[in-house]
Image (tube, grey):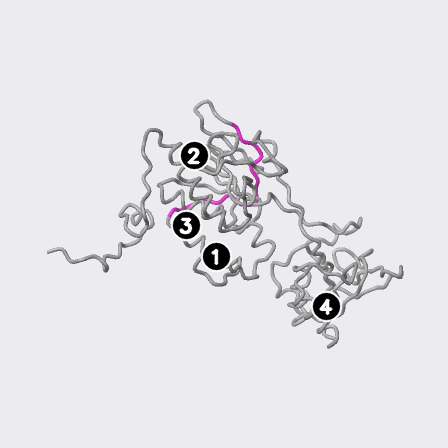
Amino acid sequence: MVETDVVIVGAGPVGLFQVFELGLLGLKAHLVDAMPQAGGQCVELYPDKPIYDIPALPACGARELIERLQQQIAPFEPQFHLGQTVTQLRVQADGRFELATSTGMRLRCGAVVVAAGLGAFEPRRLPLPAASDYEGHALHYQVRDAAVLAGQEIVIAGGGDSALDWALTLAESAASVVLVHRSQKFKAAPASVARMRALCDEHRMQFLEGEVVGLDGPAPQLSAVRVQTRAGLVTRVDAQQLLVFWGLHPRLGPIADWGVALERHQIPVDTARFETSIPGVHAVGDINTYPGKKKLILSGFHEAALAAFAIKERLSPGEKVHLQYTTTSPLMHKRLHVEPDLSGLDDVA
């Protein structure tokens, strides 16, 4: 049994910042996330695209943001339990919580913070009987290492930002790139669509209007993708790799069975404590809802700060929780493992 002050469900940017706010108040946290690495949906959906609304960072890639947050919370030594989900939450007689995960691990804590974004994500998969035989080798729903695709014949299915971004990127290094989409209308940024059409005009990639209807080759090796055009003709496109970017299904998963009140697959909270219908269980980030809610990383950071103070009050009954500033508080400096800067103070005789 793992004992800790707080368990955070979700290791995205808001979940990571929650560690920081709890750490400033002297509280230890463990994080559980279904993904095999920290970063949440922003790393899954747009790892290298710049984010422009993080204070003091004019532009910051999602992966860079996660790296900076992990560096920021390092003094508090958070413990990560990745590649697993919280399957069960029970309130104990003493008011603490016991959680069980999909790997059989059990945790006890004084408070829980749900920072699960829009929930667990699953890709919209290719609806072909043989598709699963190629997955992980020649059929992919995300790209973890673009270098392994260099020199390959690639078909990319999709019409959104991910599909266009990877088509434009891989056109520089792949043997061939063919983009397949069901229509001439795209959900991607107009600049990306214009760039794609320019590359097609330069014969550096191809666009084919149609649907993927078949895969050829002895699985898991792929030799060609069959595409049905709008005219009903089926054309065979040579391919060693097929990338499918049809978006992701968000789902709450086991959280929906915890007994927390839900509102359209989101968790209602108050705006003073960001507490759910279960006292001691808080929700921050995109998974919560309240009047005026804005789904911004910036908003999630604010929510994490207020949730941390509420949790400290819960775990320290009768003790006044003082607001201290990291600029001047010796206690904050001690917890952050930093030396105070006394250069602005007057000399004392």
Label 3 environment density (alpha carbons within 10 Å; few <14, some 14–19, many ≥20)? many
Q: CA distance from mark 3 to mark 4?
A: 41 Å
The stretch of residues the image draws in magenta is: 76-90
Nearest the eye: 140 or 220: 140
Identify the residue under disc 4.
177
| Residue shown at 52% from the left, 43% from the top | 115
The amino acid type of the residue labelled 1 equals Ile
Q: Position of residue 149 (x, y in %)?
A: 66, 65
| Side of 318 relative to 200 (left or right) | left
Do the CB atoms of the residues marked 1 and 3 lie less than 8 Å apart? no
**Residue extending farthest left:** 349
Amino acid under disc 3: Ile
Mark found first going from the N terminus, 1 or 2: 2
Discs 1, 2 touching: Cβ within 8 Å: no
The main secondary structure of the magenta stretch is: strand
Of 43 and 87, nearer the camera is 43
Task: Look at label 2 and name its amino acid.
Answer: Glu
Give the CA separation, mark 2 to mark 4: 51 Å
Residue 54 - label: 1
Q: Which residue is nearer to you in this view: 98 or 273? A: 273
Q: Are marks 2 and 4 in contact (CB under 8 Å)?
A: no
Please name which of the two marks, 1 or 3, marks the residue nearer to the observer: 1
| Residue on which the image places disc 2 | 3
- What kind of element bears circle 3? helix
Q: Of the residues under marks 2 and 4, which one precedes in the sequence? A: 2
From mark 1 to mark 3, how far is it between C-alphas?
Answer: 17 Å
Q: Which residue is mark 3?
A: 73
